[in-house]
Amino acid sequence: MFFRRRKLMPLADRGPLHVMFVATSLPIGGAETLLVDLVRRMDRTRFLPELCCLKRFDALGETLAAEIPSHAGLLAGKYDATVLWRLVRLMRRRRIDAVVTVGPGDKMFWGRLAARLAGVPVVCSALHSSGLPDRVEAPNRLLAPLTDAFIAVAETHGRHLAAREGCPARKVRVVPNGVDVERFHPRWPDRELQSELKLEPGAPTVGIIAALRPEKNHELFLYVAALVHVELPATRFLVVGDGPQRAKLERLARSLGLADAVRFLGARRDVPELLALMDVVALTSKMESNPICLLEAMAAEKPVVATKVGSVAESVQDGRTGYLTAADDSRAMADRILELLRDRPRASSMGRAGREEIIARWSVERMVRGYEELIADLYARKCAKKGLGSTGRVSEGGGREPMTSEQFSETDRRS
């Protein structure tokens, strides 16, 4: 094997950078929606994005495939090492300037190795979660020297990657998640959708938006729902998302006497409309980084009640935009939800504060500028090493620069 060197041209002397995002597939989900938003908003005068799904496109991948150059079906199975050479040939043929792998696992390993073999100047890994099942495994840690940046989604998440996941601190960059505040905004409930879901107008409604996986801890949500239901029997509960635990959770709901109160809706594309039906949005995860569902809920002016795990406290201000509880305290979460269902002025006030917070700190525009500036800066630095241009920060978008690991300690002192 050999590493091919690419002749570089300074940014000022060339056209847009060709950026390939490498994933396994793109089903409907928070991180996947974030990637769609990012790709659609990249400045096409500076960046030309492409998508590579190692296995299949899935729902959101099909959406992007209709909009940008996209590739799928390169990985035949878990131990298919020939995917490496397919990726190398693809990246060379498409003359890719930057590769961003999305998430840990096979795409992180094969995507980075192929990028270096293909002579891609910039290689990044975007990581959107913390802990099991999305750990950075030993083989991926070994490829850290081939990686220019590990992208975290919040400041505490960046510190976690450096301390727990084997990502060199000097290479960790923070680009906070962002949400489209024009798509997610306060709106009147859709009466037809309300009728379709058999929700009576005015009935208290609590929702959770998360894939039905163990780390999301929907069992806790259902135990909380049972406590709330005892005190407010008219309350209905919407479970938005799909996954391997669905049958198990449906059985648990029946055993708790919630068969008529809980609606399992599966994966949905109409999340903004579903949020309009909810009075409170909950998240019961055992671990999180910077969950998109909470940012979307806050943008829609919904108060949130979430477990205080991972980086959640960076976006949810306890007592101002929602409430935070311990990850195993069903009573505390139920009490907070009941408080918001009974005190509508308080809930509305928290919802408004949440939207203000999203507009100020967590907009999709800021996220896109962060990615653009990171990729352009890394490319400019590679050119500078070859004596082709300045190492100065590239900041045409005028946004916040991605946070480096050196800034983490200063952030700790301020918080």
Image (tube, grey):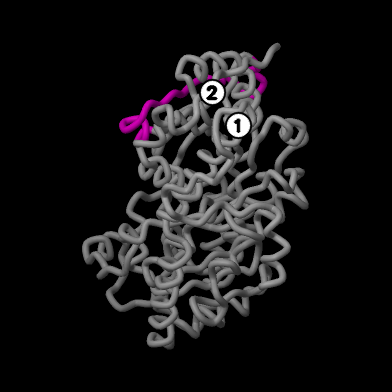
Inter-mark Cα distance, 1 to 2 = 8 Å
230 in the magenta segment: no
Q: State the predominant SS element of the stretch in magenta.
A: loop
Name the residue rendered at 38%, 50% in the picture.
268
| Above or below 276: residue 34 | above
**Which stretch did the figure color magenta?**
62-81
Nearer to the camera, 15 or 321: 15
Most distant residue in the top direction: 1
In the rendered image, the vertical position of residue 148 relative to residue 31, given as above or below: above
Residue closer to the observer: 187 or 22: 22
Q: What is the x, y in percent for residue 241?
A: 46, 52
> In this view of the protein, which residue sits in the foreground, 353 or 291?
353
Mark 1 residue type: Lys
Q: Amino acid at mark 2?
A: Leu
Q: Earlier in the sequence, mark 1 or mark 2?
A: 2
Give the residue number, with chain letter if any, for mark 2: 8
In the picture as drawn, the residue positioned furthest to the left comes out as: 192
Mark 1 neighbour density, 10 Å: few (under 14) some (14–19) many (20 or more): many
For the question of whether residue 250 can be seen, the reply is: no
Q: Is residue 80 magenta?
A: yes
Determine the residue positioned at 45% across, 31% down.
Answer: 17
Secondary structure type for disc 2: loop
Which quarter of the figure has residue 200?
bottom left
Q: Residue tagged by mark 1?
A: 382
Q: Is residue 182 visible?
A: yes
Image coordinates for residue 396, horizontal then vertical, percent: 42, 47
Q: Answer yes or no: do the residues labelled 1 and 2 have beta carbons within 8 Å?
A: yes
- Secondary element under disc 1, as helix, strand or loop, is helix
